Image (cartoon, rainbow, N blue to C red):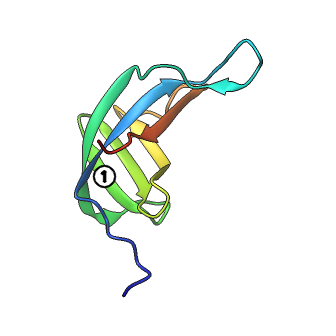
Amino acid sequence: MSDTPEVPESCTVVLKPRLTNAEGRTDHGNALRAVTVTATGGAGESGYPRYEGEGVQADIDPRTRTVEAVTVDGEELPYGWVAEVADAR
């Protein structure tokens, strides 16, 4: 048994605005863009596996499914936006 998590071949990254609800709690709202990205076989600058697709490059931690770094169409996300890995269905 290995401690190294399996790197998924592909996943869906969703881009959302960072909002707050009436009580002031973070509520990321609805996805404004969803992109299927595919593993490149390499690692990004963050050291995590690199995924690419539809103008998105993302470094994703396979253990926590956290987007550690992301660019969209060659640019950083606008302030107040977040990138998340969509739940597998």
| Residue hosting label 1 | 51
Nearer-the-camera pick, 87 or 77: 87
Marker count (numbered): 1
Q: Which element is circle 1 on?
A: strand
Nearer-the-camera pick, 63 or 88: 88
Residue appearing at x 31%, y 65% in the figure: 7
Farthest bottom residue in view:
1
Check the image and report above or below for 29 versus 70.
above
Q: Quadrant of the N terminus?
A: bottom left
Instruction: Find residue 31 and report its horizontal and vertical position in percent.
Output: 42, 23
The quadrant in which residue 86 appears is top left
How packed mark 1 is, by other alpha carbons closer than 10 Å (few <14, some 14-19, many 20 or more), is many
The quadrant in which residue 35 appears is top left
Residue appearing at x 53%, y 25% in the figure: 78
Farthest right residue in view:
23
Instruction: Find residue 28 and report its horizontal and vertical position in percent.
Output: 56, 25
Check the image and report above or below for 23 versus 5.
above
Farthest top residue in view:
22
Residue appearing at x 23%, y 34% in the figure: 54
The quadrant in which residue 59 appears is bottom left
Residue appearing at x 27%, y 47% in the figure: 52
Instruction: Find residue 56 and report its horizontal and vertical position in percent.
Output: 32, 38
Q: Amino acid at mark 1?
A: Tyr
Farthest front residue in view:
89
Check the image and report above or below for 55 versus 4.
above
